[in-house]
Every structure is written in structure tokens, then in C-alpha cells.
């Protein structure tokens, strides 16, 4: 019985040891020509670089580090002075590094981690190849596995203090998008995933807004700075022209009853209408509702002009005013000039008052 208990205890100890091992990663090897140099193991996370361990190398140059495995794929480095080997750690690898101090940065011999080997090759490529050739190689690394930390590393390589892949360059952005999408899909809570995804979406949003503003400026210039007329039927089937209100200050509103917080949005418009209508403000609301009945029920009590097209967002006026999102508001002054595309209600009263003077 005692033998069975002893065997069971040994098995439990072995299992616990295995669990501890599964929560760590190791890196070991030899760096020759670095006697008495201090070798650091550092974690290079998105926000900071943190020293995990260090050792003073002997003449043999052997080292071994054990550290807690990261929750998500992460970048580490073995560093002596300004020379370093970048390690890609995804859970519980045992990464072996064999090199000399002189070759440490660009020519280490790596085993145990394919992603680390790819990063070594990316660094060698950037150092030795013309930029165009390096980018071609890096693109293949990214597309071969966009969820890899090596693909992430490739995006943020720099040469002469400039990113090799520029997220603002339309030719480079698909590679950012590929990695951002993969990281977001498989590791949505990872801080690198969040930062990269936000970077890409912010750039796209900014460019889309700039494109809309440019289109607005273009049609204003082509129309001799005056608005383009809209002629659509109201709830009673009567055609109502935007141009009927020339000489007034106009809020031209493209919207639908399906938008989020519709009633709060209508409340904001009603507040503006009640405040400024007697001073010369008119609202001309163009609806993209698919349901005529729903639109009529929602707009019957509104005090301003509300019209609707059977073609919804495909109506000509939506294209003329480059409307790509609902709601979209334009402020038009008494001269019929489109003053601005309204970004928020916060500064709108001041703009209306300026037009009413």
C-alpha cells in the first residue's frame, strides 16, 4: 500500500512540475566572444521594455533563461549593449540561440521557433537588400500567416527612422489591414490587436471624411458656390423644392427613421427649429426610409419640410451631396452657399447664428 501511495505522490509531483513547465518558456544557448558581458532577457511589449533576467557571461558564453510564458504572442530580446536578438515567444517554446557577439544582431543560429527565425531573416533582409526587394520579401512573410507575431514585426520595421510599411500609403495599407483583421479575429483582447485595429480604422475613417469634404468642395465650386436643388414629394404627395427656401438659413438633413437614437436626434432638430425658426431658419429633411407608412407615421407631427424618395439612398440627391452615412447634415446660408457639413450639434447653434446675422 505504501508503495502505491509513494508512486501516486511521485506521479502528482510530476504532473505539477509539468503544469509549471507549461506556464514558462526557455531560451538558452551560447554567445561566444562576450566574456564578462552582461546578457539581458527583455520583454518588448507595446508600451515598454522590461528586463526579466540577466547573467554575466563566462568565457564559454553559455546561458539559460526561464520566464513566465505570455498570454499572447510577444516579442522579447536577448541584449548585450546595443546588440540584440529578437525572440518571438508564443506560449512555451524553448528557443536555442547560437552566435558570436559580433554576429549577434543579424546572424544568430536559431532553433525552436519558426517565428523567431522569420524575424532574424527579416532583419537580415532589411540590412542587406534594397528597400523594394526587402518589402517584397516582407509581404510574403505577412501574407503567409498574418496572425503571426513575425507578420506584426514586419509591419513596424524601420529604416532611417521611417517605417518600411506606411499605414497611410494605400499600397501598404492592405498589409496592415490583413494583420489587424487576423489579430482582431483571433486575439481581440490583446493590446497589440486593439492598437493596430484602431490605427487602421482611424486612418480609413479620416480618409473617408477627407474624401467627402473634397467632394463637397468640388460640387460647391461647380455649382458656383450655391446648393444643388432637390425636388421631392412630402407626406401629402406635394413636390417640395429646396430652392423654395433660398434667402433663408437652411439645415439640409439626410436621415431615416432607422438611425440609432432617432427620437433623440429629432429632439435636437426640434430644439434648433424652435429656437431659430422665427429668425429665419428652415429645415429640409430628406428621408431614405424604405417604408413609406413608417416614414409618414414618424414625420406627421414635424413642423418642418420632410420629403422622401422611393429610391432611398440611391436617389440622385444622395449622390449629388456625396452622402455615405446617415444622418448627414449640411448648413446653407441665406445666399444659398453650403457653409459646412455638420459634424456635431455642439457647435451648430453658433454656426446658425453666424448665418442669421
Image (tube, grey):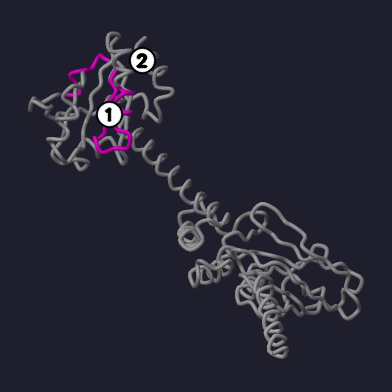
Region in magenta: 241-269
Q: Which residue is mark 1?
A: 253
Considering the image in quadrants, where does the N terminus appear? bottom right
Number of numbered labels in the structure image: 2
| Res. 70 image quadrant | bottom right
Q: Helix, strand, or loop for circle 2?
A: helix
Q: From this view, report whether residue 146 is shown above or below residue 274.
A: below
Q: Is 176 placed left or right of 330 in the picture?
A: right
Residue 357: x %, y % from top left? 37, 9
Mark 2 or mark 1: name the one nearer the start of the chain: 1
Observer-nearest of 92 and 122:
92
Q: Answer whether residue 251 is magenta in the image.
A: yes
Q: CA distance from mark 2 to mark 1?
A: 17 Å
Observer-nearest of 221 and 334:
334
Q: Is 232 placed left or right of 82 in the picture?
A: left
- Identified at 15% across, 39% down, the residue is 291
Residue 137: x %, y % from top left? 55, 71
Q: Is 129 placed left or right of 103 in the picture?
A: left
- Identified at 10% across, 26% down, the residue is 239
Q: From this view, report whether residue 237 is shown above or below residue 32.
A: above
Q: From this view, report whether residue 349 is shown above or below residue 26.
A: above
Q: Which residue is mark 2?
A: 355
| Res. 353 image quadrant | top left
Q: Residues within 10 Å of mark 1 (few under 14, many from 20)?
A: many
Q: Answer whether residue 266 is magenta in the image.
A: yes
Which residue in the rendered view is the most extreme toward the left?
237
| Res. 166 image quadrant | bottom right
- Identified at 20% across, 27% down, the residue is 229
Amino acid at each position: 500500500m505504501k508503495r502505491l501511495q509513494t508512486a501516486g505522490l511521485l506521479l502528482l509531483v510530476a504532473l505539477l512540475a509539468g503544469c509549471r513547465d507549461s506556464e514558462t518558456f526557455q531560451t538558452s544557448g551560447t554567445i561566444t566572444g562576450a566574456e564578462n558581458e552582461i546578457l539581458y532577457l527583455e520583454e518588448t511589449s507595446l508600451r515598454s521594455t522590461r528586463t526579466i533576467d540577466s547573467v554575466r557571461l563566462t568565457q564559454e558564453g553559455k546561458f539559460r533563461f526561464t520566464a513566465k510564458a505570455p498570454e499572447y504572442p510577444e516579442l522579447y530580446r536577448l541584449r548585450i549593449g546595443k546588440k540584440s536578438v529578437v525572440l518571438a515567444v508564443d506560449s512555451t517554446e524553448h528557443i536555442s540561440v547560437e552566435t558570436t557577439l559580433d554576429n549577434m544582431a543579424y546572424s544568430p543560429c536559431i532553433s525552436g521557433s519558426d517565428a523567431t527565425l522569420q524575424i532574424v531573416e527579416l532583419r537580415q533582409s532589411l540590412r542587406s537588400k534594397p528597400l523594394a526587394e526587402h518589402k517584397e520579401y516582407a509581404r510574403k512573410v505577412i501574407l503567409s500567416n498574418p496572425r503571426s507575431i513575425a507578420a506584426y514585426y514586419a509591419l513596424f520595421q524601420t529604416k532611417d527612422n521611417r517605417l518600411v510599411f506606411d499605414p497611410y500609403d494605400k499600397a501598404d495599407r492592405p498589409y496592415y489591414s490583413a494583420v489587424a483583421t487576423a489579430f482582431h479575429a483571433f486575439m481581440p483582447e490583446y493590446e497589440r490587436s486593439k492598437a493596430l485595429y484602431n490605427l487602421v480604422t482611424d486612418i480609413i475613417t479620416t480618409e473617408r471624411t477627407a474624401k467627402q469634404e473634397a467632394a463637397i468642395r468640388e460640387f460647391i465650386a461647380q455649382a458656383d458656390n450655391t446648393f444643388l436643388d432637390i425636388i421631392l414629394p412630402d407626406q401629402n404627395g406635394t413636390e417640395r423644392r429646396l430652392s423654395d427656401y433660398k434667402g433663408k438659413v437652411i439645415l439640409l438633413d439626410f436621415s431615416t427613421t432607422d438611425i440609432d437614437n432617432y427620437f433623440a436626434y429629432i429632439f435636437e432638430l426640434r430644439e434648433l427649429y424652435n429656437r431659430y425658426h422665427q429668425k429665419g431658419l428652415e429645415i429640409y429633411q430628406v428621408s431614405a426610409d424604405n417604408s413609406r407608412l413608417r416614414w409618414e407615421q414618424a414625420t406627421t407631427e414635424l413642423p418642418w419640410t420632410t420629403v422622401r424618395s422611393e429610391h432611398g439612398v440611391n436617389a440622385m440627391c444622395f449622390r449629388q451631396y456625396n452622402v455615405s452615412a446617415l444622418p448627414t447634415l449640411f448648413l446653407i446660408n441665406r445666399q444659398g452657399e453650403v457653409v459646412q457639413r455638420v459634424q456635431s450639434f455642439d457647435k451648430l447653434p453658433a454656426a446658425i447664428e453666424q448665418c442669421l446675422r
